[in-house]
């Protein structure tokens, strides 16, 4: 192989067809309130951790639905499990359980 | 695929293409990559179709390469283009034909600017007069050379000796057609067939017996763009765009790719070699690549010109498999002999791509 | 002398206004250009918000109307001449009819999805419109791809031809979002094993029961709503459709394949309505819908005395809105006729 001094960039699109939906399927069984999220951002706005750390719980929800498991693994470790998000969610999503359920699902994948 | 749907759109995007008395302006760089293409165009127009194509040796680049790399300011570009028009007016012509697609896009961009901002046109007239003492008229018709070949595709077909079919089985060859971005993405009304389903190359392929493939990344840019390509650090980004197209077209097993831009065939041809060396992947059948042709080269093949006179030997993806399918005779011993029979030497063989 | 009202258009608005005017003792001539009255309502399967059959509403409107007014189908006005306080409607067949008031109830056209070239409607076999889907559902035959197979993935594209400067329509067509959610649920009802996606910019669930329908779509039917526009469609070898979408929630482009793509097309004004409006000298908005005298208190009056407007020719409306609108128009026409001597 010749080294040309550059390599072809990796694609950054989300390939929905190829992504792994097993974590989402686990969530649908164990925390079905996840289905009713409308990504309004109330949770993220009030999040304690998000004030100081690059943590976005609305993004966690979305990545989960897209099957983007790799970024998800890092993100959920930042949650303090304080529960402020649950207080404000207009759709009644239980986010504390969501975070824990995602961790369980990821552990099961290994 | 409902072809009537596409035909309906093509009808909406018709454009005027002059039929004779052309003023031809060349590309800066095409002669390096595809040495015989412009010569083939002139031969087809002047000798076969008996058209009047006039060239002025004093014409220059349109400066698009500099403009798009941010090294030439727009005012300079407009003045350079004004000079080209001046040379055209001076020779008594009013139909401009460009060899390069970026030129075509740039001439249209400048003319549109002048249409909407007449004060800018006035200013440019002043610049040209001050710099060179010249005056100019706006061309009556601006077409790209592929538009002209498209316009005369039936005439070429009539005097042609080869067709885009497999010479043994008669099956139409599968063709990937790729237009340069500047052809119709900027000004859909200036391209035959518009931006979504451009027809200029499809028309040629259909007339000459081939079958066009519609694959998911058909519209995607090949990545050639002076901004992203000139600097080596950016080249991986450029390469990734061509790769995206190759991956998308591979399952359709195309027989060749047809393009109408100077940069696109250069990329689509050369990058197959690069990707084979970089990642060990090839996109044609049996470790070969997919041959890439310019429309002049294709028209030349249809008319029965010798492949080596068309410059096909400098393609990095060998075109021999395509020539074999079409039943075109070629003399392998003459492949690397120059114009006067002198030996030009052999290129090194690539390590992955099958070469001849 | 009995006064006559000519109603141009026998759809929901026309039928309702005709019934109310008959209730009020007025003489009505209802002109309908198609072979039968009913307008677009004839083409719908089930109506939001409660998914009851459209045919029930059509039947109700027809029953209420009965034989109380003169109905002429396959007729439409060629010319309309305004006199001092009456009108002469010249039918395309040549007959001239004198009347005292005219009600424009000409309705709407659906946006021609072929104009959004990038979606490939009319080019790719598996791209259909919401109207096509409604027809499929109404026919009772199974929902299939062009090859006759049950789709395992169906996508709905919102805002096709609406809110779109390129399509020449800046307005929101109001009913498409709820239609999209309704049809998504209907697909899941027919094909429980399928995955259904909605690609939206906003989800306009403005009316009673709409937000609950959205909740049900997510929770009960597991329909996926993806916020982002579809920029282009392409076709795979097996005729499935590849979509390029901006996933605004992750700020990344997303690629996905669907077996069937449904385009939610919006309202556009009928060219024929614009022609008649110009004849009558009534104002047309920039969005090409008919202008009324006052959006709050005189919405069935045009600028010309004796010429009234009801229904979707004056803007996007639901069927329930249209019935209410036409009822009000009938009352205003009745009051107007009382002022004529």
Image (spheres, coloured by chain):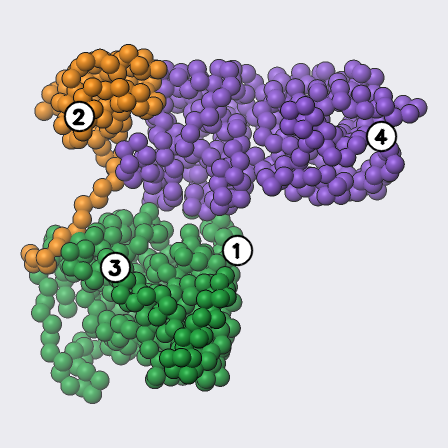
Q: Which color was chain A given? A: orange
Q: Which residue in the structure is indicated by mark 4?
A: C100
Q: In terms of depth relative to the viewer, which is nearer, C219 or C1?
A: C1
Mark 3 Cα shell of 10 Å, populated few (<14), some (14-19), many (≥20):
some
Cα gap from disc 4 to disc 3, whole angstroms? 70 Å
Tag 1, which secondary structure? helix
Q: Position of residue B93 (x, y in %)?
A: 48, 81
Q: Colour of chain C?
A: purple
* Residue C202 pos. (x, y %): 42, 29
Q: Identify the subunit bearing mark 3.
A: B
Which corner quadrant holds the C terminus of chain C?
top right
- Pointer 2 residue: A52
> For mark 3, what is the residue?
B227
Marks 4 and 3: same chain? Answer: no
Task: Identify the image quadrant of residue A49.
Answer: top left
Marks 2 and 3, Cα distance to the nearest angstrom? 38 Å
């Amino acid at each position: 192989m010749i080294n040309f001094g550059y390599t072809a960039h990796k694609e950054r699109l989300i390939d929905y067809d190829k992504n792994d939906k097993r974590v989402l399927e686990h969530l649908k069984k164990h925390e079905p309130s996840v289905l009713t999220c409308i990504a309004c951002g109330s949770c993220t706005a009030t999040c304690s951790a998000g004030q100081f750390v690059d943590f976005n719980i609305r993004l966690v929800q979305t990545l989960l639905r897209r099957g983007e498991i790799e970024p998800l693994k890092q993100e959920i470790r930042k949650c303090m499990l304080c529960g402020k998000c649950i207080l404000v969610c207009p759709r009644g999503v239980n986010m504390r359980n969501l975070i824990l359920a995602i961790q369980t699902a990821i552990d099961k994948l290994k | 695929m409902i072809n009537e749907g596409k035909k309906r759109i093509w009808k909406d995007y018709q454009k005027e293409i002059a039929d004779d008395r052309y003023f031809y302006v060349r590309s800066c760089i095409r002669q390096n990559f595809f040495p015989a293409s412009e010569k083939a165009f002139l031969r087809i127009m002047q000798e076969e179709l008996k058209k009047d194509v006039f060239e002025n040796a004093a014409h220059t680049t349109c400066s698009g390469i500099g403009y798009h790399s941010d090294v030439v300011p727009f005012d300079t570009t407009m003045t350079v283009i004004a000079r080209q028009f001046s040379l055209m007016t001076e020779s008594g012509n009013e139909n401009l034909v460009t060899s390069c697609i970026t030129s075509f896009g740039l001439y249209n961009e400048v003319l549109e600017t002048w249409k909407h901002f007449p004060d800018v046109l006035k200013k440019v007239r002043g610049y040209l007069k001050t710099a060179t003492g010249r005056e100019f008229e706006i061309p009556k018709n601006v077409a790209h050379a592929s538009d002209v070949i498209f316009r005369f595709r039936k005439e070429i077909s009539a005097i042609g000796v080869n067709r885009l079919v497999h010479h043994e089985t008669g099956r139409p060859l599968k063709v990937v057609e790729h237009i340069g971005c500047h052809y119709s993405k900027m000004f859909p009304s200036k391209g035959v067939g518009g931006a979504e389903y451009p027809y200029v190359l499809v028309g040629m392929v259909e007339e000459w017996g081939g079958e066009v493939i519609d694959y998911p990344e058909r519209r995607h840019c090949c990545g050639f763009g002076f901004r992203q390509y000139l600097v080596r650090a950016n080249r991986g980004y450029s390469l990734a765009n061509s790769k995206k197209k190759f991956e998308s077209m591979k399952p359709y097993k195309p027989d060749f790719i047809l393009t109408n831009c100077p940069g696109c065939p250069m990329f689509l041809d050369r990058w197959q070699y690069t990707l084979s060396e970089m990642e060990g992947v090839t996109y044609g059948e049996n470790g070969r690549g997919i041959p890439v042709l310019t429309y002049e080269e294709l028209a030349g093949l249809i008319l029965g010109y010798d492949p080596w006179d068309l410059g096909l030997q400098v393609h990095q993806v060998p075109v021999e498999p395509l020539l074999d399918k079409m039943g075109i005779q070629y003399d392998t011993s003459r492949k690397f002999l120059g114009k006067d029979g002198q030996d030009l030497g052999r290129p090194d063989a690539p390590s992955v791509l099958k070469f001849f | 002398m009995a006064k006559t009202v000519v109603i141009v258009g026998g759809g929901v608005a026309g039928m309702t206004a005709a019934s109310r005017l008959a209730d009020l003792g007025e003489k009505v001539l209802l002109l309908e250009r198609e072979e039968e009255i009913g307008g677009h309502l004839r083409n719908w399967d089930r109506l939001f918000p409660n998914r009851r059959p459209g045919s029930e509403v059509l039947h109700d409107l027809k029953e209420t109307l009965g034989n109380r007014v003169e109905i002429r189908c396959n007729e439409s006005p060629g010319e309309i001449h305004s006199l001092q306080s009456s009108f002469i409607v010249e039918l395309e067949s040549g007959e001239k009819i004198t009347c005292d008031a005219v009600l424009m109830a000409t309705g709407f056209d659906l946006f021609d999805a072929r104009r959004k070239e990038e979606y490939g409607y009319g080019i790719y076999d598996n791209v259909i419109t919401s109207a096509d889907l409604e027809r499929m559902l109404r026919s009772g035959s199974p929902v299939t791809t062009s090859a006759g197979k049950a789709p395992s993935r169906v996508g709905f594209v919102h805002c096709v031809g609406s809110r779109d400067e390129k399509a020449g329509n800046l307005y929101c067509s109001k009913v498409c979002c709820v239609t999209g959610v309704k049809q998504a649920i209907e697909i899941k009802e027919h094909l429980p094993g399928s995955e259904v996606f909605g690609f939206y910019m906003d989800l306009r669930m403005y009316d009673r029961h709409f937000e609950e329908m959205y909740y049900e779509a997510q929770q009960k039917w597991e329909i996926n709503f993806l916020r982002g526009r579809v920029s282009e469609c392409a076709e795979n070898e097996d005729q499935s459709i590849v979509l390029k979408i901006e996933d605004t929630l992750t700020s990344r482009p997303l690629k996905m394949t669907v077996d069937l793509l449904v385009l939610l097309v919006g309202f556009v004004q009928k060219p024929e309505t614009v022609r008649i409006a110009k004849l009558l000298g009534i104002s047309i908005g920039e969005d090409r819908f008919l202008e009324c005298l006052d959006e709050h208190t005189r919405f069935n009056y045009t600028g010309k005395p004796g010429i009234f407007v009801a229904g979707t020719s004056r803007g996007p409306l639901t069927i329930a809105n249209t019935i209410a609108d036409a009822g009000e128009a009938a009352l205003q026409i009745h009051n107007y006729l009382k002022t004529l001597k």
